[in-house]
Image: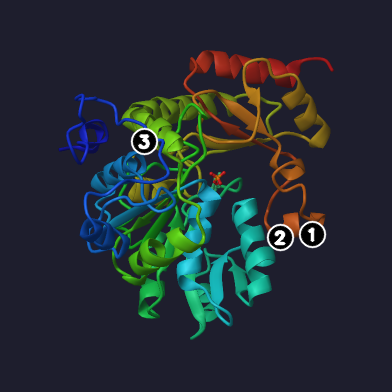
Amino acid sequence: MRKTTIAIDTKLPRRDAFGAIAMPVYHTAAYEFETAKDMADAFCGRVLAPDYSRVMNPTVMHLEDTVKALTGATNVFAFCSGMAAITNALLVFVEQGKNIVTSNHLFGNTVALMNRTLTRFGVETRQIDLLDLDAVRNAIDEHTACLYLEIVTNPQLEVADLSALADIAHERGIPLIADTTVIPFTQFSAKQLGVDVEVVSSTKYISGGATSLGGLVIDYGTFPVVNQRIRFELLFNVGSYMSPHAAYMQSLGLETLDARYRVQAQNALTLTKKLKEVPEIVSVNYIGLEDNPFHELAVKQFGKTAGAMLTIDLADRKACFSFIDHLQLIRRATNLFDNKSLAIHPYSTIFGPFSGKQKAAMDVRDTTIRLSVGLEDVEDIFEDIVQAIRVES
Ligand SMILES: *Cc1c(COP(=O)(O)O)cnc(C)c1O
């Protein structure tokens, strides 16, 4: 079956007592067993049966099973947020004295997790330019735990050459962990491009309606330690598993993900072509545009569509703030890939806590607006942008 069908048709592991078509929400903390032996088998992992909802829950397992079928993963683990998924994936590999080799362009909280939180536990982070493959080779040493990256960085929209970076990681025996939040796994295979562990903020495209937070660790089985540590150690000891209610919302989102994504990606392409003609906009950055420096690599890796995240640069911060203040349709909000279009000035918000120097090093500019294109009629999105730019303030 094709992915669009799999997303709709992954069967429940057992027939529901009432034949429910949607996965019921198992709002329960614990599960009763028939016998002491059944209980012992479940608790010791000899049988994969839920015993306690910090570690396993049928509603969450249904979401995990669907993602497993869609990606061809060996294991999928659902967490309560994207950051929880990233933290758990990293905790599999890092320990005191180890280092993470990663990009100088990363999601704000991921940078802070590495540079602030993990540093306190003796883990070093080496942020480099991932476009410079020699710099990547040189940064990796015998203490490197993993190579970590985002497939398309936000807000710079730099595309990582996954196959080349995977080869470098594998030559040195370390895993490539990739945050693939910005292009859904229904569109491309991270596994085929050499990614060992995929992390996704399912808050974004998968939830769709911005209904719930969630994160996924998608394990391709190349490093067996991922399954051992997450399933038998971290789920128990860290306790950041997805809640059944969030899993229900996100399973519903997953069923329509591909249909929504195709409209959003088409809207983004149509919109960026029109925005390029607006003289007040200094530049439009979208990897779906043919003159974008990453376009060819993006097509090779992700196929014809290029996601729904783009940025525009205006003259200065004042123009950006005025633009945001005058939007009437597009929402002033963080988040990405909601059904509704969203706008944010990353420099003063997501990257607000970083110094000007740090922001310069990350190529986060005061003149950039990030847009996430939704499912509205693209003409309405365009008209809102133009009126917000041109309004007399
Ligand atoms: C939003 C986001 C995260 C964090 O996910 P949450 O679900 O908000 O915790 C991580 N990486 C990327 C690329 C994101 O866009």
The residue to which callout 3 is attached is 26
Residue 211: percent from the left, percent from the top?
50, 29
What label sits on residue 361 in the rendered view? 2
Q: Residue furthest bottom?
A: 142
Neighbour class for label 3 at 10 Å: few (<14), some, many (≥20)?
Answer: some
Q: Are marks 3 and 2 in contact (CB under 8 Å)?
A: no
Left or right of 112? Residue 372 is left
Estimate the spatial distance between the alpha carbons at disc 1 and disc 3, rounded to whole Å.
49 Å
Q: Residue at x 45, y 60 (%)?
A: 236
Neighbour class for label 1 at 10 Å: few (<14), some, many (≥20)?
Answer: few
Q: Secondary structure at mark 3?
A: loop
Above or below, comparing residue 393 to residue 303 in the picture: above
Q: Residue at x 69, y 49 (%)?
A: 364
**Which badge, 3 or 2, comes first in the chain's sequence?**
3
Three-letter code, disc 3:
Tyr
Left or right of 292? Residue 347 is right
Answer with the quarter of the image where residue 36 lies. Answer: bottom left
**Which badge, 1 or 3, comes first in the chain's sequence?**
3
Could you say which is closer to the camera, residue 145 or residue 348?
Answer: 145
Whether ligand 1 has any atom under 8 Å from the Cβ at mark 2 is answered as no
**Disc 1 vs disc 3: which is toward the camera?**
3
Q: In this rendering, does residue 10 appear at all? A: yes
Three-letter code, disc 1:
Lys
Q: Secondary structure at mark 2?
A: helix
The residue to which callout 1 is attached is 357
